[in-house]
Image: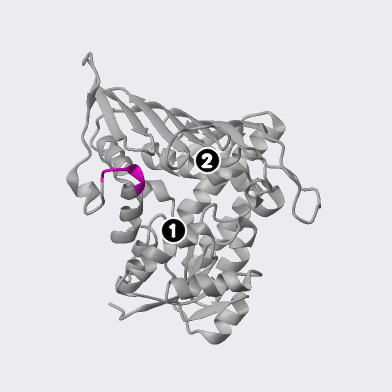
Amino acid sequence: MSDTVRIGVIGTSWWADAMYLPALTNHPLADVRGVVGGTRRDHTREFAARWGVPGAYDAVEDLYAAEALDALVVLSPNVHHFRYAMDAIERGLHVLCEKPLAMTSGQARQLAEAAERAGVVNMTPFTYRFMPVTRHVKDLLDDGFIGRPYHLNMRYYADYGRSGAYSWRFDLDQAGAGISGDLGSHWAYLARWFYGEITAVTAIFGHAVARAPRPDGVPFPAAEDSAMILLEFENGATGSLHVSAVAHEPSAFGQRHEMDLHGSDGTLHVLNDWNTIQRVDGCRAGETALHELPIPDRLYGTARRDTVGNTYKDTFRQHDHMARGFVTAIATGTGASPDFRDGLAVQRVVDAAGRSSRDGRRVTIAEIVAAEG
């Protein structure tokens, strides 16, 4: 096992502040050597000082020139993911890159193949895979609770796009996709994790809220703020994903998750209200009433259960999930999960959804793969 893992971080957003630096600085084997924050020099330096990071840099080239690193964590806007991640791989660094992995599946494939050739640890961290409620569902499915999967329905309602203020997340030039990539990628990952490979996609995108122009006044191609995505699975099951950034939800996080999973032998219903409820109910074929299927203590570990927000924070700050799991994988010489191959599979679904919405037709994953070259 390595003594420490020397890490550089690109990105000083609220997400880095809330999810990554608390986890990394709390890991006994992580040594965050520097952060890159771009044009907001004072903010970058304040960010570094707050987390006890010795280096604050305006460009990744400055980071590399000043620090000897083992790994890079890429938390930048999507348009920069490919460049930063590929450069790090070519330098022999282990890489964690936020989702969606790239702007296109062609780029994501290049990253996955390059990381495999280089033999570096790589991770695309789909957050909800690590939450106790979701891991419980996966365990129930693996234990055969619903039998052969028939269909699933997953809803992710959020409100961060309701104001209409400019955000790079709704700028196709910066994000590559709108809500289908930002939240839909989470649900596409879980759908595949639950039911297996996805073979075809049909999607309808919504543009409910008019967007303010970029700060420089230059027009931009507006991305979707809601999406309905139908999935076909290799095993014959079907699925629907409904994701929205314009849904008012009265919760501490302004969002709500719901899932229904049906199969030959049973049914599961999942609710995470992002206040105090994180619950799984189910019934087996022949039963006449749903009943709660309590989340096992082992899945919570030391995470608090009083609110969903506290469970969320503790899961990533105290346990070896996501950023902490990435560090442990490097230190122990093991693989990380989800990895860039998972990121690639999800990117193909996102690209298929975009093509389906534009063309008004069903799009197979094979079609997306063929277009990658």
Badge 2 amino acid? Gly
Looking at the image, what colour scheme do you see?
Answer: one colour
- Under circle 1, the secondary element is helix
Chain-order first, disc 1 or disc 2: 1
Residue found 51% across the figure and 60% down from its top:
112
Type of amino acid at the residue the image marks with label 1? Ala
Q: Main secondary structure of the magenta part?
A: loop
Badge 1 is on which residue?
18
Which quarter of the figure is the C terminus placed in?
Answer: bottom right
x and y percent of residue 68 in the render? Answer: 48, 84
Q: Is residue 372 visible?
A: no
In the image shown, does 304 or 228 lie closer to the viewer?
304
Q: For mark 2, does the 10 Å Cα neighbourhood hold few (<14), some (14 to 19), or many (20 or more) residues?
A: many
Circle 1 packing at 10 Å, graded few (<14), some (14-19), many (20+), is: few
x 44%, y 55%: residue: 125
For label 2, the residue is 184
Q: Residue at x 32, y 73 (%)?
A: 331
- Give the farthest residue toward the left: 297
Say whether residue 131 is left or right of residue 247.
Answer: left
Q: What's the CA distance linking mark 1 and mark 2? A: 21 Å
Q: Nearer the viewer, mark 1 or mark 2?
A: 1
Residue in the foreground of this view, choosing between 281 and 197: 281
Secondary structure under tag 2 reads helix
The magenta segment: 305-309
Q: Is residue 312 left or right of residue 92?
A: left
* Whole-percent x, y for residue 286 in the image: 22, 15
Residue in the picture at 21% in, 52% down:
301
Q: Which label number is shown at residue 247?
A: none
Q: Is residue 121 above or below residue 184?
A: below
**Label 1–label 2 contact, CB within 8 A:** no
**Quadrant where the N terminus is found in the figure:** bottom left
